[in-house]
Image (tube, helix red, strand yellow):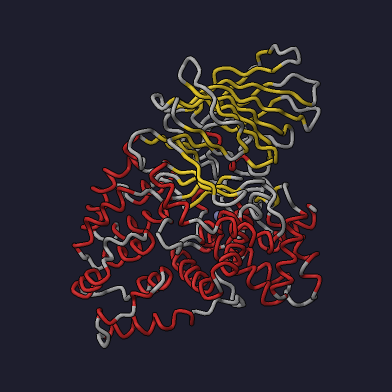
Amino acid sequence: MKLAALAWVVATSAQAADAIRPGVDYHSFANVDEFRVRHVALDLAVSFREKQLSGHADLTVHRQSPAARALVLDTRDLDIRSVSLLNNDSGSTPLVFKLGEEQKYLGKPLRIEMPAGTADSIVRIEYRSRPQASGLQWLTPAQTDGKKHPYLFSQSESIHARSWIPLQDSPQVRVTYSATIHAPDGLVAVMSAAHGPVGARPDAKGLTAYRFEMKQAIPSYLIAIAVGDIEFRAIGERTGVYAEPGVLDAAASEFADLERMVAACEKLFGPYRWGRYDLLILPPSAPYGGMENPRLSFITPTVIAGDKSLVALIAHELAHSWSGNLVTNATWRDFWLNEGFTVYLERRIVEALYGERRERMEDALGLQSLRRDLADLDPAHQQLALDLRNEDPDDGVTEVAYEKGKLFLQFLESRFGRDEVQAFLRGYFEHFAFPSIHTEQFLDYLRANLLAQKPGAVTAQQVQEWVYGPGIPALAVLPPQDVFKPIDGAREAWVAGSLATASLPARSWSTQEWLHFLDNLPQAVRGERLAELDKTFTLSKARNAEIALSWYRNTIRNDYAPAFPDIERYLTSIGRRKLVRPLYEELMKTPKGAAFARAVYARARAGYHPITVTSIDAIVSPQR
Ligand SMILES: [Zn+2]
């Protein structure tokens, strides 16, 4: 496997002495060739007053090499109290440990001296997290829907699990896990795992214990927790929604198709292997649209549009139950294996549930969004396989992994046929279920199981161009944009002045049609025309968060003042990075906009998730 794998890379980086090595995780300190963690058992108390998780993690460690002496784990902002070896007689032996130097993006290595001999041992680490843990967000009651109780949720991808659990924080290490979480009385804890009986009485400290177990081996970035005033509503037999009580009704009706979605996905890509599929609707500060935590996807409330028009995001998170959670990228360089495949699956689900027209609109908008990203990216960041050494892997999150990855599968479809590609994917999910793989392992599998079926249909050179080349290859099969032809016609007539604002047939437009209309307006539109649009369709107060974003971009570009109070409300009430980042970027282009951005950010920052803060800090910095 290794030799063949290298052949793919040699062609692009033959002379480079520092050539990237496939399968090597440059974002982890863990010495995975010497020791492997197999199971993580957590016992953690949740303190909202201290903003900390405290307790212990018991790691079941397997020695890979007899000569291995030190176990190296990933940590970030953790206070380590003690490390010990659990003995069979339920006693323990202290182990010598040392935290290394802090490294940018990565945190600190925790080096534990292991006794010689035993192949398997259980290491207990007593520790606590710090309030600034990058993978946790501690919300005050004011930041929740109910305003009465605080809320905690995690976001471990890419490398933030280490900020709340000391472990081998690399996607190529898969662990089973169990947890006992002691939550303040009246609050409910949920995790990406099966839960034990609910309804235990609080202990003497007023804490209620919740028990969890994940029996399938998952990468660390899928370990997830949330604690808050959370209730559950069933949708189907194995599906349901968790949310704050005030959000539950809206969420349950928006995502009423959940059970059907799982069934559609199974029909296309094989059995759902995780038991239940539930959603947790997070407070509005959630930094991502969704996070595919197994059994329990974490979802932003900004996709609750009232008309199911943004549920493609749910299809996306569900699809990760195959691409990502079952077959996982081995390193963050291989992120496109998670995301490109998932977008491809997502579109198949959307098509099966909501029809071909809707799917083609999503495809067309996806391409527009990819082109916007490519315009701002240097060639090195336009490759599917990304060199992210010395970078924060969260910065690798662009449409390249998503939409260009999907275009690659679309290209294969055009050469081999849809049925063949879907059959190939079913086999791929089956073959690689539960290990983590890197780009070249996938390419080898592709060569043997699809390309070889029809020699010459796709050449190695073409694959090379897709995976290691910049931009969109000339041989890409691009989604036709004609699905938006009527919208283009209406826009052109409106811009030319031959169609009055009141005559725009927009009352019947779907979200996707609105996005296409707004995203493709000319750079300069006069204020009174924007005012007409706003007055006729109340765009500044749009309930749909995506339409609002597209509208605000136009208003900032044209300095349309009436929208600014609404932009401020938007930026201070939600924290999803995809929605707020483009607005800060647009604002920073003029001195007046920059002053506004800084003033708003000064108030919004405390309510944002650490991941969003990192991104916006870099945009709204005083140096710029
Ligand atoms: Zn995804």
Q: Is residue 391 visible?
A: no
Q: Nearer the viewer, residue 425 or 173?
A: 425
Question: For ligand 1, which image quadrant applies?
Answer: bottom right
Q: Position of residue 83 (x, y in %)?
A: 62, 19
Q: Is residue 456 visible?
A: yes
Q: Is residue 102 left or right of residue 422?
A: left
- Please tell me which residue is depicted at 78% across the width and 20% down the height of the picture: 116
- Would you place residue 409 above or below residue 580 in this image? below
Q: Quadrant of residue 16?
A: bottom right
Q: Quadrant of residue 546?
A: bottom left
Q: Is residue 506 left or right of residue 352?
A: left
- Would you place residue 49 above or below residue 275 in this image? above
Q: Nearer the viewer, residue 404 or 295?
A: 295
- Please tell me which residue is depicted at 30% across the width and 67% down the height of the picture: 554
Q: Position of residue 41 (x, y in %)?
A: 64, 28
- Please tell me which residue is depicted at 27% across the width and 60% down the height of the picture: 541
Q: Is residue 563 left or right of residue 394?
A: left
- Would you place residue 330 above or below residue 72 in this image? below
Count of numbered badges drawn on the protein: 0
Q: Position of residue 79 (x, y in %)?
A: 50, 23
Q: Nearer the viewer, residue 130 or 419?
A: 419
